[in-house]
Image (cartoon, rainbow, N blue to C red):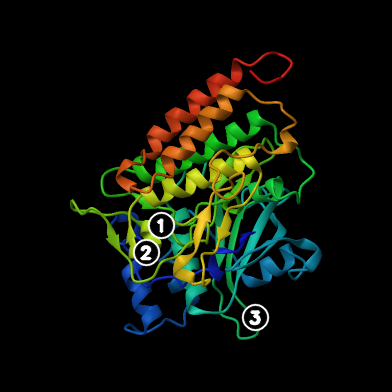
Amino acid sequence: MVFPFRCFSMSYVTHDDTSVPGNTTFFSTYTSLTERLSGTAPSSQNVPDTIREYPTTLRAFKLAELNLATNNFDQSRKIGEGGFGNVHKGIIKSLENPSINISVAVKRGKRGLQERRQWETEVKILGEVKHPNLVKLVGYCNEDSIEESNWLLVYEYMPNGSLDDHLSGKSNIHLSWSTRLKIAKDAATGLTYLHEGMGVDRQLIFRDFKPSNILLDRQMNAKLSDFGFARQGPQDGRTHVSTATVVGTKGYAAPEYVQTGRLTAKIDVWSYGIFLKELITGRHPLAQKTPGNKPEGMRWVCCCAGVGKSKPVVDPRLEGRYSERSLQKVSSIADKCLNKDPKLRPTMSEVLNMVNEAIVLDNQQPPNGGQT
């Protein structure tokens, strides 16, 4: 039996206790934060003391400010939801010029230790790591409140929502093949930066790469979002990081990671391969049960034409308007990313180079946009 499967990352697995990068300069304060979370150090009741431990580049919001910005988190302002919590559109005042209004997205975490750990991870990473293809974190709120959840994150507002909105049909915006290629390039650029562009011993593994974590701005530029599961890569010559618990989303997590808990950057490469198949087909991954319906017998069919077939069906919404050579190139890249042996998968910089080649092929198509 083959059936479509969709879920949010939090419904899949539990976050492990060591998921936040810990040995780089910009994460040097995480130890004290972890001690407070685990109860090994006294927690401060003084909010300003707590705030000073977070990156000074971020804006520390009061809960009252964000209540006002979102009209008390009115349902009409809700623009998304996930395992961490709901996201609402808000309007805040510019610090430089209070007469200017700024649109933001306010993510409100559920009350729980797991959500707090994700919140801490996002603040520490996006407070320090900046890149055009990573969503910008404007600020945060961790003000104590007994009555309501207060793990709040404030991001730049991305008017065109997530890529998943467009691929799943929630949006009326048509994604042309060239736009999909641009999104693929932006996403690959963001992952390449996390894996290879941050300097020695500063690799970050995203761990939950999927279309719903790719946000699109007004010009359809793509940015990675939701860094709550990000983890520092192996250091000191080690081949992998051993994790206590696997995190991610069913259908996107690499098989060797699910089976062993061993973490390398190649798990993001696998997820990227699934993502490329979705760009081609417009379909989510499929789960195929084996006889007996045992969970360990579940395997994933990556958006293919059907059981036993490997050639993907092209999204009919493309209406045949794509370069056949370009599409074949992207399919080939996806196959390389989905190699069962992680050592044989390309690096993200190699993937990015191949995506650029696919874009060149697409630009060689006839002016009428037909197949070539």
Tag 1–tag 2 contact (CB < 8 Å): yes
Looking at the image, is mark 3 or mark 1 earlier in the sequence? 3
Q: Identify the residue position indicated by label 1 in the image.
A: 255
Tag 3–tag 1 contact (CB < 8 Å): no
Q: Say which of marks 3 and 2 sits in front.
A: 2
Residue type at mark 2: give it.
Gln
Give the x, y percent position of residue 264.
33, 53
Cα gap from disc 3 to disc 2, whole angstroms: 38 Å
Q: Look at the image and tell me whether residue 319 can be seen.
A: yes
Cα gap from disc 1 to disc 2, whole angstroms: 6 Å
Q: Identify the residue position indicated by label 2 in the image.
A: 259
Looking at the image, is mark 3 or mark 2 earlier in the sequence? 3
Q: Give the residue at x 49% y 26%.
A: 356
Residue 56 occupies quadrant: bottom left
Q: Look at the image and tell me whether residue 51 can be seen.
A: no
Q: Identify the residue position indicated by label 3 in the image.
A: 148
Label 2 crowd (10 A; few <14 / some 14-19 / many >=20): few
SS category of the residue bearing label 1: helix
- Seen in the picture, residue 220 relative to 307 is either above or below; the reply is above
